[in-house]
Amino acid sequence: MSERRENKTILQLERVSRFYRTRGNVFRGGGRLVVALNEINLSLRAGEIFGLVGESGSGKTTCGRLIVRLEEADQGRITLNGEDITHLKGKKLREYRRQVQMVFQDPYQSLNPQVTIADSVAEPLITNKVGSPLDHMERVLKVLKTAGLSPAEDYVYRFPHQLSGGQRQRVAIARAIVLEPSLLVADEPTSMLDASYSAQIFEILQGVRDKMGATIMFITHSMASARYLCDRIGVIYRGHLVEQGPAEQVINAPQHPYTKALIDATPKFGRAAEVPTYGTLLAAERPANSSAGCPFFRRCALAERLLCAGTYPPWRQVGPEQVALCHLLEDAAPAVSTG
Amino acid sequence: MALLTVENLGIGYQTAKGLLKAVDGVNFTLEPGHSLGLVGESGCGKTTIGMALMGLLPPNGRITEGRIVLDGLEISAMSEDELRKVRWNKVSMIFQAAMNALNPVKRISAQMVEAIQVHRPEVSDEAALTRVEGLFNLVGLPLERLYDFPHQYSGGMKQRAIIAMALALNPKLVIADEPTTALDVIVQDQILKETKELQRQFNIGIIFISHDISIVADVCHQIGVMYAGQLVESGPAEEVFFNSKHPYTQALVSSFPTLAGPKTKLAPIPGEPPNLTGTIPGCRFCDRCPKDTASCKLDHPQWQEVGPGHHVLCDHC
């Protein structure tokens, strides 16, 4: 799939940050500021599947929500095809959302239980006043087929409770692609599903990319699924992007200690001999005095006290199109751009 | 002597639509200190088996046939009072969703002391607390967190507390039902390694229930693959994964993405599992099976031995 990768940038995040304030109370006073995303630079190329990999709480879902504009960035700029969408409002925002859609994690919660599948999938067409009611059904049947629900006629008058989890997630995908968006954000679409269904969802997402030409951001905690589905991968740790590059390179030759730790922790499924063990994760967290240093300092087995605790690491160019945020990659040249 | 013997086990749930046979004709044995992984998709009956081993089936569920014998005691024929003596003393369980298995308004230490004293009323408060401290050390929880409430713990710490509680009375058998499903990969990896180590150290038998074959593949000696209430393939872990014979096991293995090896196309399994309320005359997998023949739909498949200790419920393997 990599040979048909284009270089045209469709979506760009420039130094995007998002903060949350925890709720204070009578005893503790005001809330604490939590950095969900810290100066993220990312760009998605037209027609690619980009994997954003990280643990829970790493900010990967927040990143997706900023892109579909369910939330607004506190700092930085997000552009789609060169147009600034960071703070769009009203009519312009509605127009933007026709181009950018999201598939949520939990198919048991993302569909209205009282609405038939046909109405659920047609709803985006109605709210966006696309086409006449007469051709809505035709479009609904078409996207249900694209989403692997065939014969589609059997599903249109069913309710969500009559479907399995895998089928519901396919309806959620159908609903997201019915407006033919140019960008689809899929937030852990398979984490609630059994393996046999996940493989179907992967196939459908590939189909959406190949047939509809959509660009996909695939948010996941699984390195193995990212390897399977994605052209490029970004690894995110506690709100900081720490490594980015072509999928095969990041997985076969990871450079950042956190990426290495993630690969160590992934079940090898009897293929342990074929994957090196890196041992970059510290067994117990070490204390850090300042928050100015490397975000991974507390858990990094390789960290050097003075350098890593005190200063924020630079981006290094560690391979063709592969960059990592680490002090210890001294041999590598400074990265030209992290986007 | 085997620690656990399950013979021809059948479990049904009484539902509005009739008796749902969640488990049908399951046989397996577990040696002391060994681990068995039960894998299969949701609804295949793996948690039901776990609950039956604990004598904790819901009110509408009952054992319709077969026997469960643990350490010479027939669990399947016991009354509630007798079961209470076996539970936690001989067999304990690590429940799914550890986040919800702890009482949110009680301190961790108090909950663990309670778990010990409910099953061993003769143990004094001091002795129970000493035991809890020992358990904290065992599972790698810092002692200064003894008097915390569950909400002060991270997901991984809660899971460790649950594991500690399951080990509190030195059981011979631990049933771990999806113990790491809600955890991040790094924490999951640590907990799996620790569980494996504890098992070796104390010679505990473990039944590991999971929908994720990649996890059981790394942890268990023996694997049982379940489909629609039946065991369809069982044997030593490597045999089942690298030399799988049943079409369902093959499909399950090839529907998992891996980190290493050739990037082959994943093969999704088409279709859905059958409805278990009626009677199914032939093989339960035949609607989704690539090897399906006319006779598969009519006759019950028979168990075949395909290797040492490696059995398959399929007539075409």
Image (tube, coloured by chain):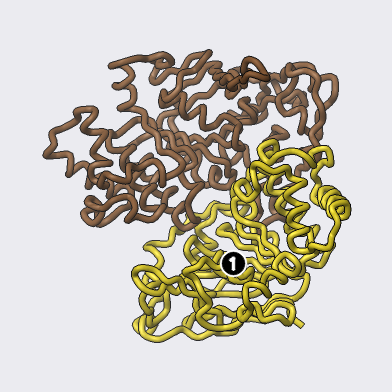
Chain A color in figure: brown
Chain B: give its colour. yellow
Q: Nearer the viewer, residue B275 or A155?
A: B275
Picture coordinates of residue B74, whole percent (x, y): 66, 81
Q: Position of residue A14 (x, y in %)?
A: 52, 16
Please name the amino acid that badge 1 sits on.
Leu
From the viewer's perspective, tell me whether residue B72 is left or right of residue A150: right
Q: Does residue A9 appear in this view? A: no
Is B4 placed above or below B112 here?
A: below
Q: Which residue is drawn at 63% across and 71% down?
A: B53
Compared with B79, A280 (above or below) is above
Q: Quadrant of residue A209?
A: top left
Relative to B269, residue B291 above or below: below
For the N terminus of chain B, which image quadrant? Answer: bottom right
Whether residue A60 is visible, yes or no, is: yes
Q: Mark 1 points at which residue?
A: B56
| Left-right relation of B176 to A82 | right
Decide if residue B110 is on the left or right side of residue B10: right
Q: Where is residue B152 in the image (x, y as percent from the top left)?
A: 69, 36
* Chain letter, disc 1 residue: B
Residue A264 in the image: x percent, y percent?
71, 45
Quadrant in the picture for residue A34? top right
> Residue A153 lies in what quarter of the image?
bottom left
Q: Which residue is drawn at 79% across and 22% down?
A: A308
Q: Residue at x 74, y 60 (%)?
A: B118
Q: Residue at x 68, y 75 (%)?
A: B82
